[in-house]
Image (cartoon, rainbow, N blue to C red):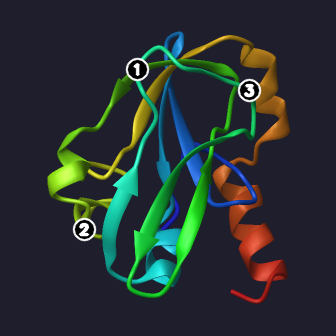
Amino acid sequence: MILEGLHYTKEHEWVKVEGDRGRVGITHFAQSQLGDVVFVELPKVGRSLRQMETFGVVESIKAVSDLYCPLTGEVLEINSTLESKPEQINAAPYGQGWMIVIKIANPKELGNLMTAEKYRAYLAAEGH
C-alpha cells in the first residue's frame, strides 16, 4: 500500500505536506518489514532537523531502526500516543501511526524525495 499525494524517502519514511507543515511517518512497507513495533523514540518538540537527519528510533520484535526526517524543519508536534500504543504504527502507518509534524523550512527539498509512482518503482527495483 503506497498512498498518492505523499513524498517518500529511500529509507521508507513518508511526508504529507499540509501548508507549511509536514506530517511524517514510516511506510506500510517499512512497518511490514519490521514486524510488530514495540517501542518508538521520538524527538522533543522544538528540535530542528536537517533533511535526512535521524530523528528517532523504532524498535520491533525483529529489529531496531533509525528514523530519518524527509525535510529540514522544526518539530512542532509528536504523536505521544505512540509511547503507550506503538502498535498503531503497524495498524495505520499512514493514519494514527504518524510520528512527527514539522514546520517545513525549505519546500524545494521535496524535489529530493520520491512520488508514490517513483517509490513503487524503487521498491520493485529493490526486489520488493
Percent from the top left, x then y, of residue 46?
47, 14
The quarter of the picture where residue 108 lies is: top right
Disc 3 element: loop
Q: Which residue is mark 3?
A: 50
Which numbered disc, 2 or 3, marks the residue that appears first in the sequence? 3
The amino acid type found where label 1 is placed reads: Val
How many other residues sit within 10 Å of disc 3, few (<14), some (14-19) or many (≥20)?
Answer: some
Q: Are marks 2 and 1 in contact (CB under 8 Å)?
A: no
Residue visible at 58% across and 67% down? 65
C-alpha distance separating marks 2 and 1: 25 Å
Tell me, yes or no, if residue 107 can be seen here.
yes
Left or right, 99 with reference to 88: right
Say if 83 sits above or below 77 in the image. Answer: below
Q: Amino acid at mark 3?
A: Arg
Residue located beneath label 2 in the image:
91
In the rendered image of this protein, does residue 100 appear above or below residue 4? above
Q: Earlier in the sequence, mark 3 or mark 1?
A: 1
Residue type (three-letter) at the residue carrying disc 2: Ala
